Image: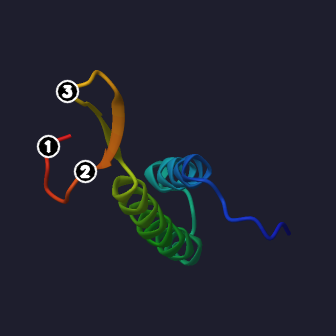
Amino acid sequence: MSNTKPTFEENMKRLEQIVRTMERGDAPLEESMKLFQEGTDLVAQCSLMLDHAEQQVTKIVVQPDGQFTEEMLPDGEDR
């Protein structure tokens, strides 16, 4: 098994697989419970990844002299 963490996209793909399996309703109860737990964990991981990405968002600001600078967006500012 690889030591690299799955990407957001990989987590979302796996979550979609879990949802499809559970929607079919053909998995035994024990497997459904394991899938539900895995899905819950994936949602939490994806949420953390999104929070981290949001914290890194910057905006480009044009200065009076025409130069561009980057500024971190403050919390709560409309993006």
Image coordinates of residue 44 in percent, x first then y, are: 42, 69
Tell whether 33 sits left or right of 51. Answer: right
- Which residue is labeled 1 in the image? 78
Q: Nearer the viewer, residue 58 or 9?
A: 58
- Which residue is labeled 3 in the image? 64
Q: Amino acid at mark 3?
A: Pro
In the image, residue 19 above or below residue 29: above
- Which element carries disc 2, helix, strand or loop? loop
Q: Amino acid at mark 2?
A: Leu
Viewport quadrant of the N terminus: bottom right
Residue 52: quarter of image: bottom left
In the image, residue 43 above or below residue 66: below
The residue positioned 54% from the left and 52% from the top of the image is 8
Asked if the residue under mark 3 is in contact with the one under mark 1, i.e. CB atoms within 8 Å, the reply is no
The colour scheme used here is rainbow
The residue positioned 13% from the left and 56% from the top of the image is 76
Q: Earlier in the sequence, mark 2 or mark 1?
A: 2
Q: Earlier in the sequence, mark 2 or mark 3?
A: 3
Image coordinates of residue 79 in percent, x first then y, are: 21, 40
Give the numbered dot on residue 73.
2
The residue positioned 42% from the left and 63% from the top of the image is 43
Q: CA distance from mark 2 to mark 3?
A: 19 Å
- Which element carries disc 3, helix, strand or loop? loop
* Labels 2, 3: front one: 3
- Which element carries disc 1, helix, strand or loop? loop
10 Å crowding of disc 2: few (<14), some (14-19), many (20+): some
In the image, residue 45 above or below residue 70: below
Q: CA distance from mark 1 to mark 3?
A: 22 Å
